[in-house]
Image (cartoon, rainbow, N blue to C red):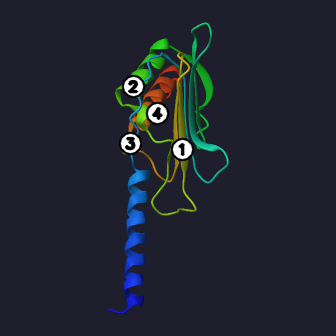
Amino acid sequence: MNMKYLLLIATAAATLLALLGCKSVKNSVNNKPVPTGKLVSFHYAEYGTMPQPNFEYTLKSDTKGKVKLCVFKLWDEKWGDTIKVDAGVLEHVEKLIKDNNLQNYLDHYRPEFEVLDGYGWGYEAEFDDESILHSGGSNARPGDNTLEVIAEYLDSCYASVKGIKLKN
């Protein structure tokens, strides 16, 4: 075989192996310990092509132990203020975070191939032991739906306080 063809085949094989290697690194899983502190704040948002978020949730405990929930949804004027909620709401979100190991989310998710339009998302959870969990992505997400479950739960809390009927 011609040396030029051997070099071309070797280069192609090396490129393929490098691409496959990058893919496995990108999709690796973190193995971080579950936070031991109590959740004091949670934030989750998703952004589209608009400068403001499509939706945003902020759940926070103040120094007196009062918990506030702010829900904003870009396309619905009924969703967009801050309400007081029971401390059990914060505890339930903490349980979902810990039970589903959100500390193992990657710092950033992105698709295998570059996408120039689409969505971005991010979440951050802060605990009283000063540990902070965070993750985000552009056109890619982790394989589970825990953040969506938390969002649905916070929607139900907000709707209950505000007297809004949720769509099934």
Mark closest to the chain's N terminus, 2 or 4? 2
Measured as percent of width and height from the top left, residue 130 is found at 56, 20
Q: Real-space Cα distance between discs 1 and 4?
A: 13 Å
Name the residue carrying label 1: 121
Q: Real-space Cα distance between discs 1 and 3?
A: 19 Å
**For the residues carrying marks 1 and 3, which lies nearer the camera in this image?**
3
Count numbered badges in the picture: 4
Tag shown at residue 98 = 2
Q: Real-space Cα distance between discs 2 and 4?
A: 16 Å
Q: Nearer the viewer, residue 59 or 152?
A: 59
Measured as percent of width and height from the top left, residue 35 is found at 44, 22
Given contact means CB atoms under 8 Å apart, are the residues at marks 2 and 4 in contact?
no
Amino acid type at circle 4 is Ala
Q: Quadrant of the C terminus?
A: top left
Measured as percent of width and height from the top left, residue 16 is found at 39, 70
Amino acid type at circle 1 is Trp
Amino acid type at circle 3 is Val
Given contact means CB atoms under 8 Å apart, are the residues at marks 4 and 3 in contact?
no
Name the residue carrying label 4: 151
Mark closest to the chain's N terminus, 2 or 3? 3
Q: Real-space Cα distance between discs 4 and 3?
A: 23 Å
Q: Real-space Cα distance between discs 2 and 1?
A: 20 Å
Disc 1 residue crowd, few under 14, some 14–19, many 20+, Cα 10 Å? many
Residue 166 visible (yes or no): no
Name the residue carrying label 3: 29
Report helix, strand or loop for mark 1: strand
